[in-house]
Image (cartoon, rainbow, N blue to C red):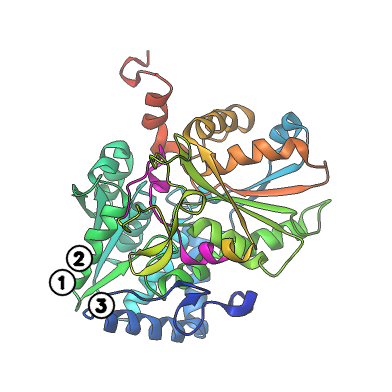
Amino acid sequence: MNDLFNSFMNGPDENGRFGDFGGRFVSETLMPLILSLEEEYERAKTDESFWAQMDDLWKHYVGRPSPLYFAERMTEDLGGAKIYLKRDELNHTGAHKINNVLGQILLARRMGKTRIIAETGAGQHGVATATVCARFGLKCIVYMGAHDVKRQAPNVFRMRLLGAEVIAVTSGRGTLKDAMNDALRDWVTNVNDTFYCIGTAAGPHPYPAMVRDFQSIIGKETREQLQEHEGEGRLPDTLIAAIGGGSNAIGLFYPFLDDESVNIIGVEAGGKGVNDKMEHCASLTGGRPGVLHGNRTYLLQDDDGQILEGFSISAGLDYPGIGPEHSWLHEIGRAKYVAITDKEALEAFQYCCTQEGIIPALEPSHALAHVMKIAPNLPKDHIIVMNMCGRGDKDIFTVAKALGFDMSDAD
């Protein structure tokens, strides 16, 4: 695994910066915890026993490697590029989140922490954290926006079944931003025994780089699988992934950043359309740089620098910022970022169900919608790899409501 840490300029720098983004903007109380975490992770990165345990859990507990699936019917129907889906929704707990949670909780145990806190939007990070805490017998508290508690009820129940305490956050609009705010407040007041397990590639350094490193197993497997795939044996031409904070996307992208022939596209939540009312969560498309949750990155904000709420049908993409490494990749032009609306994502959701027999989460449905836009106009030997980062069980009620289907009258 150590080869993952030697690519693409080896960013961030010693101050946790990706160009002008990233850094550590935290209270004096948290700085010793952040520095301690950084030191422990630096030790773990070169500890063969740490990676041996990670590899064993990824294989026997998570079910990795996840398949790289050729979407034959979708490819034929769209009539252009070959479409491959990296099936991370088949992981234990149903999403990519557990890849990173395992690494962070192993670090927490090395540091002697017994209480784990986490934030969650769609609930997949909360479920993954609750799962791994149950596996190791650790206390788990998950902060979740009250709005998300309602629209992601199946995941709330799963977390509680796994023994986690789920705290509904009523401040703000009751979404992921607000859950992260309250988790940070908890951490400040419980510094001795508590470890904050952040679910996305954002937050103060070392979190963005650390989460990226754990999630890079996605891209590393993709690279190997496509090289070994019968009839391919080469790199992909285009990588596509959905982005809220951006952990699944940077996990797919990172092992390919040095390969100039590989096009990289991140797909943000366009909500009701990118407009001045901020009825979207497309930070790179409709935002500008600022500071939130301990790092400098692109944000949705007003002229006075106040963070705006934004909107997305997808709870996991409903965040007014983005991971700082994505901001950097955007600024230097290594990756392209686009926005997909709720309507387009819902169409892609249904298309995936009927074409491939796969019910996707709303998050990767955004990425698939962009695949559907560009694939027909690309050559037939062009290879697109899209990260299917989560399955759609959690979104059934949201989708049913959006499509006007009454779940109470299913007969």
Direction front: furthest residue? 303
| Numbered range of the magenta stretch | 307-328
Residue visible at 44% across and 82% down in the picture: 15
Q: Position of residue 121 (x, y in %)?
A: 34, 49
> Horizontally, is 97 left or right of 259 in the view?
left
| Rendered position, 72 above or below 234 | above
Marks 2 and 3: CB-CB under 8 Å? no
* Residue occupied by mark 1: 189
SS assignment at label 2: helix
Residue type indicated by callout 3: Leu
Residue type indicated by callout 1: Thr
**Which image quarter: residue 107?**
bottom left
Measured in 3D between alpha carbons, the distance from the residue under mark 2 to the one under mark 3, in whole angstroms, is 10 Å
Direction left: furthest residue? 189
In this orientation, which residue lies closer to the viewer: 155 or 342? Answer: 342
- Where does the N terminus fall, quadrant-wise? bottom right
* Residue occupied by mark 2: 185
* Residue occupied by mark 3: 30
> Horizontally, is 409 left or right of 92 in the view?
left
Residue 197 painted magenta: no
Q: Position of residue 182 (x, y in %)?
A: 22, 59
Marks 2 and 1: CB-CB under 8 Å? yes
Q: Position of residue 300 (x, y in %)?
A: 39, 52
Q: Position of residue 399 (x, y in %)?
A: 42, 29
> Horizontally, is 350 left or right of 111 in the view?
right
SS assignment at label 3: loop
Mark 1 or mark 3, earlier in chain: 3
In this orientation, which residue lies closer to the viewer: 153 or 237? Answer: 237
Residue type indicated by callout 2: Arg
Mark 2 or mark 3, earlier in chain: 3
SS assignment at label 1: helix
